Amino acid sequence: MAAPWRCSSSLRALPGPALFTPWAVDLLARVAPQPGERVLDVACGTGIVARPLQYNPYLRALADALEHHITPEAGAVMRAPCSLGDAEAPRALLATAGFRDIRLHIVIITIRHPAVAEFLAGQLAAAPVAVAVAALDTAARTALLSEIRATLQPYTDDAGLAVPYETLSP
């Protein structure tokens, strides 16, 4: 189980990875649920409502490099989180499921990490393509990581990686 984080509006500890804390705090601040109301954060933590790739240079860099160095299918795995990034798709699914008062907002956070190479290695090791990445020989893995780092270079500053990540949120 992930470490609990504190929700500033309800003052209760909720489980969830620290990466998603800014989204959760923002979501609850915008929705401002009243006692007895509930909030459904659709696909929380899956990234499935990430905005299209043109708004997510991080996912685009991963998908393109995986396609170039492993297979087109590996690239498709990293493109999948953007499959519901058009607001109308999740809105229609939620309406069909009986939800009312559906409000979606674009939320932009900055993925920050001081050590780009360490961050990328960890992300790829935790991704659905981890086995395929691990099967690469050293030269191929180095080439994969080099392509991703080069693509993300415009999002790197003296403090490390600072890349925007856009998603839809209620």
Image (spheres, rainbow, N blue to C red):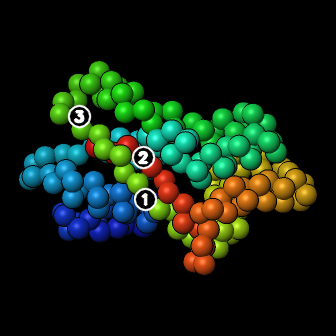
Q: Which mark is residue 21?
A: none
Kindly identify which residue carries mark 3: 102
Measured Cα–Cα span from mark 3 to mark 1: 22 Å
Left or right relative to 6: residue 124: right
Kindly identify which residue carries mark 2: 167
Please provide percent x and percent y for residue 33: 14, 51
Kindly identify which residue carries mark 1: 109
Q: Residue at x 87, y 53 (%)?
A: 140
In the rendered view of the protein, which quadrant contains the N terminus?
bottom left
Measured Cα–Cα span from mark 1 to mark 2: 9 Å
In the image, residue 121 sits, relative to residue 106, either above or below, namely below
Q: Is residue 122 visible?
A: no
- What secondary structure is marked by label 3? loop
Local packing at callout 1 (Cα closer than 10 Å; few below 14, some 14-19, many 20+) is some
Please provide percent x and percent y for residue 36: 10, 48
Left or right relative to 14: residue 18: right
Q: Nearer the viewer, residue 98 or 163?
A: 163
Say whether disc 1 or disc 2 marks the residue closer to the N-terminus: 1
Say whether disc 3 or disc 1 marks the residue closer to the N-terminus: 3
Q: Nearer the viewer, residue 5 or 67?
A: 67
Local packing at callout 3 (Cα closer than 10 Å; few below 14, some 14-19, many 20+) is few
Q: Are marks 3 and 1 in contact (CB under 8 Å)?
A: no
Left or right relative to 15: residue 67: right
Q: Residue at x 42, y 46 (%)?
A: 167
Q: Are marks 1 and 2 in contact (CB under 8 Å)?
A: yes
- What secondary structure is marked by label 1? strand
Query: What amino acid type is highlighted by mark number 1?
Result: Ile
Q: Residue at x 23, y 46 (%)?
A: 39
Query: What amino acid type is highlighted by mark number 3?
Result: Ile
Measured Cα–Cα span from mark 2 to mark 3: 16 Å
Q: Nearer the viewer, residue 13 or 43?
A: 43
